[in-house]
Image: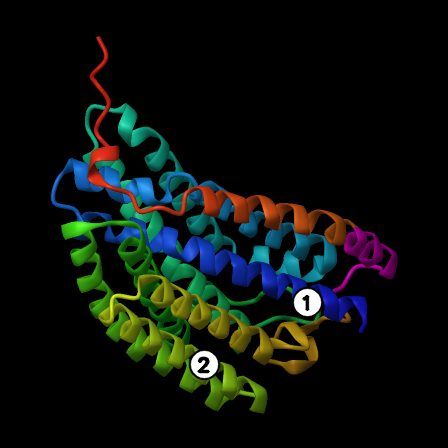
Amino acid sequence: MELTTVWFLLIAVLWIGYFVLEGFDFGVGILLPLVSRDETDRRTVLATIGPVWDGNEVWLLVAGGATFAAFPEWYATLFSGFYLPLFLILVALILRGVAIEYRNKSDGTRGWDRSLFFGSLLPALLWGVAFANIVRGVPLDADHEYTGSLLTLLNPYALLGGLATLTLFTLHGALFLALRTEGELRARAVGWVKKAGAAALVAGGAFLVITQVMLGKPATWATAALAALGIAGALLATLRGRDGWAFTANAVAILAVTVTLFGNLWPNVMPALDPANSLTVTNASSTPYTLTVMTWVAAVFTPVVLAYQGWTYWVFRKRVTRGRTQAPAPTA
């Protein structure tokens, strides 16, 4: 297997990890004002992601760094053409991180909660818009420069992709809350599992069907079907009280959606409306020497990172109860 193919697959794996792990962070942030009834509820909700949310964002940093190093032409075209949407995502992620860290250190929490809500909702929506455009293709000239505008990116297909990721991540967050909380808070999370699950089946199903009709390859029909089965399985497992299996099923659905998108993208990395101007794994890649060095580095450090993050989730695997998230005493 050529190293360009290896790194395309590795970048796809990094995005899978990011969407599966950061996806429930987005969902929890979106659901914070919807499942909470008081400050103790809000503290309990945030405590479910408190130990892990910043570690989950590492997957995005590594995916961006790997793209820059392995496919610099792809990185340059993507970040110049999608500058405004990616800038909005960055601002939203900053607001969300600051809100998580500082809301408990402030007398007033309403502003921080709003920042957390919108800082979760915008990336959940805009990542779908961005990837839908990447898979569909964008206007590029012969120098691989983006020639469209912001309105070009806000086409109906891309907006449907954004709605699909928004509902899917909201469902993922509801399933995570059902898995990590107890009592009335868990019951409210289960109620949102049903609502978000129905929305994800409709929006995600429509998006995947349109994607397959327009761009689909024979193999990706199977992954698209697996995504739908994963969402349906999550709903069924929730109704039976199997929270762990429900969360796992939806994680498989997110994996299947991402594989479907990357499978339809290959061998391009940035398709153009004029196929002659498309960026591929061949004309967008770094030198073989660079890819070889990167491969050895990844082979050494990736297992270490995976082991550490797996240990973190094992340590914080128990359900969070209201009694463990009391507000700190006021300072003098």
Q: Is residue 60 visible?
A: yes
Q: In terms of secondary structure, what is the magenta stretch mainly?
A: helix
Q: Is residue 138 visible?
A: no
The amino acid on which the numbered mark 2 sits, given as a three-letter code, is Leu
Please provide percent x and percent y for residue 136: 52, 77
Does the segment drawn in magenta span residue 243? Answer: no
Please provide percent x and percent y for residue 68: 68, 53
Residue neighbourhood size for the residue with mark 1, other residues' Cα within 10 Å, grouped as few (<14), some (14–19), many (≥20):
many
In the rendered image, the quadrant that contains the C terminus is top left
Q: Nearer the viewer, mark 1 or mark 2?
A: 2
Please provide percent x and percent y for residue 143: 71, 66
Q: Quadrant of residue 266?
A: bottom right
Does the segment drawn in magenta span residue 285? Answer: yes
Of helix, strand and loop, which one carries label 2? Answer: helix
Residue located beneath label 2 in the image: 226
The relative height of residue 47 versus residue 56 in the rendered view (above or below) is above
Residue located beneath label 1 in the image: 8
Q: What's the mark number on residue 113?
A: none
In the rendered image, the quadrant that contains the N terminus is bottom right
Color theme of the render: rainbow
User: As drawn, which residue projects farthest toward the left?
Assistant: 37
Q: Point out the tag, 1 or 2, that comes first from the N-terminus.
A: 1
Distance between the alpha carbons at the discs numbered 1 and 2: 22 Å
- Identify the residue at image location x=32%, y=78%: 232
- Magenta stretch: give its range: 284-296
Please provide percent x and percent y for residue 207: 39, 79
The amino acid on which the numbered mark 1 sits, given as a three-letter code, is Phe
- Identify the residue at image location x=36%, y=42%: 96
Of helix, strand and loop, which one carries label 1? Answer: helix
